[in-house]
Image (cartoon, coloured by chain):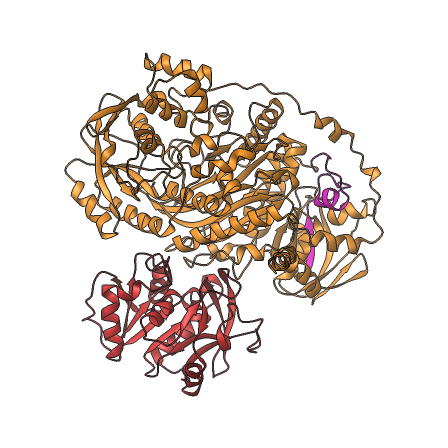
Chain colours: A orange, B red
């Protein structure tokens, strides 16, 4: 088959990239080689349109044990000879087409990134975005994605401890499915994704290779269109049982000491794992593709190179110790075969039945090597002008605040996600302390120590849309605030940058300004970005999604007994708001969903004010002065109070002190850097002394169950809880009723 | 007495069970690989545990394949000789598939996996808060079997609400007669869907499971 620029374009490479490939090789590539470049130089693998900006993020320092991007996931020191390994990754495109498998394999892929480094995953989180919940399509996607995450995670046996879900029109065609995994590794037991040592065997372990997921990496590097459903074969199929065995076998094989390096096969399958491991070790490989176990006959070279069949690992072992490796995988009934060896010339030579089918310099294929890096143009989005025009005075303060509050509590983005999380095994592993004692960030113990990890995913993309720079700072700040409110010290960040098409200058503007804001906030909190994932092309003919730079953050508690919970403890405790309120209703759920104003600036936020707030909260927790802490986020102060009251069926009697603040801003505004705490009445004086000159407000007291706001009776906590708990279920039961009717 | 925890390739509550027995209850525990058969170091005073998880992937009926594993042949023999066997969740499913316990576990009534704290009670009317986590936990048996189980006092636990009422709303999976766990007529084989091992560690804020394991398996004091 003759390879031309047209072939390249069909493989989603540009004309310039095709020329560059010819230049690098000194010849025209054959079809197999071109396929290899197509996978490796896809946006998904090469980060070609993002890497220049990603490098501006704080990528080292603190407790980091490997530099960002050097390994499959971030690795940070938590003391006591232990490290935490964590990463977040997107599986948006597959989930848009096939929500169940798309989400399931997203979970599988991120766990492999963790255990390929020698760590045992102990917690999993996710961050999901869908369109409006009253749409059939959204309900189909939501139930498919939730089912997929549960199916894979529950069987694999890692608790799904937290996450976030928002519903907004912009995600109707392009849902976002970001999965995060957190693992623990002992010092000295980490494995690098590096191939070393001429003559060392290259081994293939795990599931047999099929034709599923071919071209997945390049599929994820294009917009979603009506034709996208024809890309179904680009969606992978997951087998969590196989992955569970792979996990145990990989951790066991590391103990033999015979492993030189290991990398999971994710995007772009064999070509990516061989290229990245070789490039990092500055070696080459000779691979006999006919030795790769397949589950379909007559697979072609390019199919074998690009297949994204799940639950597979590439492993380089010490020569002569193959049998030790094979023994472990045989114990776990997993295929394991030697498919080649490490060479010293930097070239990947792929053979099929003795014939050389592709010959590629590993270095030229990879990010940081020959893969192109682009500067994209950017320009300020036109909608910014409308945002600037917003005048809050045009929004009348409603008379009946209680009825507004009821509508807010029933918004799917605000209300309880129990329909979702009850489908996830959140307790397997017996390490999740938040089941019985809710915390702002889910808290998992590190068994065998007194330590615990507070883990969270956060991003309010409405804020980022309104102001990419400030919105990204808020995302980082909220993650850190959740960890601080749990009693933890924020350690580091993994990010999942979900944006539209990078060739759109307005999208690119959002991207670089979000990066700038994220970098500034991460430096402020001393939480380096340890790695992550960029997902562009979350776009369809109607436009891009809101810029959604999801922050996954991990924090440390040296002693789990010093944790702070979010629930009010006892009637009579005094409720304080640390931080000050103002007249801000900008970009609140109230303004967007109740008043129907989509375009307004991001809420008030100052980085320095946020840091001081967090330091104050840490001080109050360390001095053992407060009973609960819960930050004010979506839905505003009233929702925060409810959430603190629900767990023990307590109520609250609160009065806003400042009459200059409009009532809707007071109770539903989303001005940042505020935390609701409760304290024993007897400690109030001491607490106030500790708060010092940091702004705060005494809101009222915890009651036995009645809810009173500004002197008015707002019912009982039970009735609020009922509304909060059942809102999403009510949306979905309408669909079930509808489909039952249609089947009659 | 000592405990043995069977490890199937897809077991994922095996280590949790080990931790609960070993660290929270101070018991002697060893792990038993599914391909092995040797139970010679266990006497009938000891207890073999089938933990939760997805034994062999459970793509067929849960526990249907595990029943045929080498270790299960020995466990069945051990049970028939009077040895104590306790199955939790997937372990309960395996015990039913192995016919060591009557009835079976069907897909949850709402067709969804369910993970949450539930309340269970028994004839002592003591109420325990214990987590469930399963997709196929709806206990089912024919009427005669159910009547016999109840007449013999073989129902270990019923789902109930916080106050001990066996209501429909407190039944997480639609189990017949709110049944959460049963034992055999000889009272040496026990199975339950809720996970007592997840409610043993004080740091997790719920230790109700300790009492279940202690009284049922170690002291055999449950009113059965």
Q: Residue at x 31, y 47 (%)?
A: A246
Front-most of residues A469 and A700: A469
* Residue A80 x, y percent position in the rendering: 36, 47
Relative height, residue A371 to residue A468 (above, below): above
Horizontal side, residue A218 vs residue A420: left or right: left
Residue A77 highlighted magenta (yes or no): no
Span shown in magenta:
A574-603
Taken as a whole, is the magenta stretch helix, strand or loop? loop
Horizontal side, residue B3 vs residue A582: left or right: left
Q: Give the total of numbered labels.
A: 0
Front-most of residues B28 and A623: B28
Q: Residue at x 69, y 54 (%)?
A: A410
Does any portion of residue A557 appear in the rendered image? Answer: no
Does any portion of residue A338 appear in the rendered image? Answer: yes
Q: Residue furthest left?
A: A320
Horizontal side, residue A75 vs residue A696: left or right: left
Front-most of residues A159 and B183: B183
Q: Residue at x 30, y 60 (%)?
A: B8
Position of the N terminus of chain B by quadrant = bottom left
Residue A578 highlighted magenta (yes or no): yes
Q: Residue at x 71, y 39 (%)?
A: A587
* Residue A158 x, y percent position in the rendering: 42, 53
Q: Residue furthest bottom?
A: B151
Position of the C terminus of chain B by quadrant = bottom left
Horizontal side, residue A380 vs residue A658: left or right: left
* Residue A95 x, y percent position in the rendering: 50, 42
Residue B102 is drawn in which quadrant? bottom left
Front-most of residues B152 and B129: B152
* Residue A393 x, y percent position in the rendering: 84, 38
């Amino acid at each position: 088959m003759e390879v031309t620029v047209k072939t390249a374009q069909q493989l989603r490479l540009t004309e310039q990239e095709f020329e560059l490939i010819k230049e690098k090789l000194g010849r025209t590539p054959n079809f197999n080689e071109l396929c290899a470049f197509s996978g490796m130089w896809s946006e998904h693998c090469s980060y070609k349109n993002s890497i220049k900006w990603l490098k501006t993020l704080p990528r080292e320092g603190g407790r980091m044990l490997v530099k960002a991007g050097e390994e499959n996931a971030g690795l940070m020191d938590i003391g006591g000879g232990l490290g935490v390994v964590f990463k977040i990754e997107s599986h948006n495109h597959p989930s848009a087409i096939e929500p169940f498998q798309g989400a399931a394999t997203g979970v599988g892929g991120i766990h492999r990134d963790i255990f390929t480094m020698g760590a045992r995953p102990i917690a999993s989180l996710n961050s999901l975005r869908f369109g409006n919940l009253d749409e059939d399509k959204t309900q189909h996607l939501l139930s498919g994605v939730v089912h997929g995450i549960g199916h894979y995670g529950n069987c694999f046996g890692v608790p799904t401890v937290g996450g976030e879900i928002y519903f907004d029109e912009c995600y109707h065609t392009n849902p976002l499915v970001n999965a995060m995994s957190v693992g623990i590794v002992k010092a000295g037991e980490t494995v690098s994704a590096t191939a070393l040592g001429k003559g060392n065997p290259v081994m293939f372990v795990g599931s047999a290779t099929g034709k599923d997921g071919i071209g997945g990496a390049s599929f994820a590097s294009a917009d979603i269109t009506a034709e996208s459903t024809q890309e179904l074969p680009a969606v992978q199929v997951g087998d969590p049982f196989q992955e569970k065995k792979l996990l145990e076998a990989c951790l066991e094989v590391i103990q033999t000491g015979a492993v030189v390096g290991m990398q999971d096969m994710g995007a772009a399958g064999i070509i990516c794992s061989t290229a990245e491991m070789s490039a990092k070790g500055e070696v080459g490989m000779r691979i006999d593709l006919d030795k790769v176990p397949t589950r379909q006959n007559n697979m072609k070279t390019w199919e074998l190179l690009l297949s994204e069949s799940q639950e597979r690992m590439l492993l380089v072992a010490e020569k002569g110790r193959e049998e030790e490796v094979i023994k472990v995988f045989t114990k776990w009934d997993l295929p394991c075969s030697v498919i080649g060896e490490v060479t010293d010339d930097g070239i990947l030579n792929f053979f099929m039945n003795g014939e050389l089918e592709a010959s590629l310099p590993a270095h030229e294929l990879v990010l940081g090597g020959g893969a192109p890096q682009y500067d994209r143009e950017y320009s300020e989005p036109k909608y910014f002008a409308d945002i600037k025009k917003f005048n809050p005075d045009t929004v009348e303060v409603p008379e009946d605040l209680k009825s507004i509050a009821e509508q807010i509590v029933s918004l799917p983005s605000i209300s309880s996600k129990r329909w979702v999380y009850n489908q996830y095994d959140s307790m397997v592993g017996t390490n999740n302390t938040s089941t019985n004692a809710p915390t702002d960030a889910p808290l998992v113990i590190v068994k065998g120590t007194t330590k615990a990890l507070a883990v969270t995913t956060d991003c309010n993309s409405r804020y980022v849309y309104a102001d990419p720079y400030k919105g990204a700072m808020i995302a980082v700040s909220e993650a850190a605030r959740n960890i601080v409110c749990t009693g933890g010290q924020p350690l580091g960040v993994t990010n999942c940058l979900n944006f539209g098409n990078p060739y759109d200058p307005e999208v690119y503007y959002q991207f670089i300004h979000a990066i700038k804001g994220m970098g500034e906030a991460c430096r402020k909190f001393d939480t380096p970005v340890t790695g992550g994932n960029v997902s562009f092309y979350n776009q369809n003919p109607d436009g891009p999604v809101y810029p959604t730079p999801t922050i996954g953050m991990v924090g440390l508690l040296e002693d789990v007994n010093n944790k702070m919970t979010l629930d009010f403890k006892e009637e009579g405790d005094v409720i304080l708001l640390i931080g000050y309120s103002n007249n801000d209703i900008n970009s609140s759920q109230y303004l967007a969903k109740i008043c129907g104003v989509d375009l307004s600036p991001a809420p008030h936020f100052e980085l320095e004010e946020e840091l001081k707030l967090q330091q104050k909260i840490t001080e109050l927790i360390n001095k053992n002065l407060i009973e609960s802490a819960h930050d004010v986020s979506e839905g505003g102060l009233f929702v925060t109070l409810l959430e603190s009251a629900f767990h023990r069926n307590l109520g609250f009697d609160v009065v806003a002190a400042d009459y200059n603040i409009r009532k809707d801003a007071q109770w539903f505004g989303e001005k940042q850097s505020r935390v609701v705490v409760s304290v024993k009445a007897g400690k109030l004086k001491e607490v106030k002394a500790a708060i010092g000159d940091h702004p705060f407000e005494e809101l009222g007291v915890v009651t036995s169950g009645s809810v009173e706001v500004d002197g008015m009776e707002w019912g009982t906590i039970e009735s609020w809880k009922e509304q909060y708990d059942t809102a999403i279920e009510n949306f979905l039961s309408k669909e079930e009723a509808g489909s039952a009717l249609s089947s009659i | 007495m000592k405990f043995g925890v069977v490890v199937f390739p897809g077991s994922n509550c095996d280590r949790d069970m080990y931790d609960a027995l070993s660290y929270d209850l101070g018991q002697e525990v060893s792990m038993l690989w599914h391909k092995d058969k040797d139970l010679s170091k266990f006497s009938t005073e000891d207890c073999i545990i089938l933990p939760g998880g997805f034994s062999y992937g459970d793509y067929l009926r849960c526990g249907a394949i595990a029943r045929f594993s080498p270790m299960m042949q020995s466990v069945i023999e051990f049970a028939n000789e009077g040895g104590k066997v306790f199955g939790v969740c997937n372990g309960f499913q395996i015990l039913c598939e192995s016919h060591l316990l009557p009835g079976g576990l069907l897909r949850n009534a709402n067709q969804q996996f369910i993970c949450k704290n539930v309340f269970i009670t028994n004839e002592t009317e003591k109420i325990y808060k214990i987590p469930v986590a399963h997709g196929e936990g709806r206990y089912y048996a024919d009427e005669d079997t159910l009547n016999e189980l109840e007449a013999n006092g073989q129902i270990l636990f019923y789902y109930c609400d916080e106050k001990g009422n066996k209501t429909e709303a407190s039944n997480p999976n639609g189990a017949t007669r709110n049944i959460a766990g049963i034992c055999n007529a000889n009272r040496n084989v026990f199975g339950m869907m809720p996970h007592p091992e997840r409610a043993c560690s004080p740091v997790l804020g719920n230790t109700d499971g300790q009492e279940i394991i202690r009284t049922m398996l170690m002291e055999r004091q449950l009113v059965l």
